[in-house]
Image: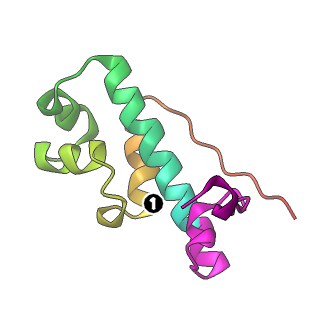
Amino acid sequence: MNKQDITITEGSGNVFMDLGFDPAEAEVMKLRAEVMIRTAQRLKEQGWTQAEAARHLGITQPRVSRLIKGKVEDFSLDMLLTLAARAGLHPELRFTA
């Protein structure tokens, strides 16, 4: 394969939409992923072990592990927002047209 054989397609800004998910579902998946990433980053910033994070978040250590590993399918958006708030974040939802 030569460089001239490579086609680059610009993404939409939502990888889930680019993968062919329904636009509404893709938006929810994008939100879930973003909240999960930011919450995991916050846990790392706090320097908590998974056991400590579990106590602060009110969930089990295996669930913290799934959060850190990005197992987005294991968490609803509602639960992720709850965990983010328990981690000391202040999530906001904004609407645009």
- Which quarter of the rendering shows the C terminus? bottom right
Q: How is the image coloured?
A: rainbow
- Residue at the farthest right position: 97
Position of residue 61 measured from the top left corner of the image (x, y, whole percent)? 12, 42
Choose between 41 and 61: the one closer to the eye. Answer: 41
Position of residue 26 measured from the top left corner of the image (x, y, whole percent)? 59, 71
> Which residue position is annotated with label 1?
78
Residue 37: name its quadrant: top left
Please, is residue 21 above or below residue 56 in the view?
below
Q: Is residue 3 magenta?
A: yes
Segment colored magenta: 1-27
Q: Residue at x 36, y 59 (%)?
A: 72
Q: Residue at x 64, y 53 (%)?
A: 3
Tally of marks: 1
- Judge left or right: residue 89 versus residue 76: right
- Which quarter of the rendering shows the N terminus? bottom right
Q: Is residue 50 visible?
A: yes
- Judge left or right: residue 90 versus residue 51: right
Choose between 58 and 4: the one closer to the eye. Answer: 4
Amino acid under disc 1 = Asp
Q: Residue at x 56, y 56 (%)?
A: 31
Position of residue 7 measured from the top left corner of the image (x, y, whole percent)? 69, 63
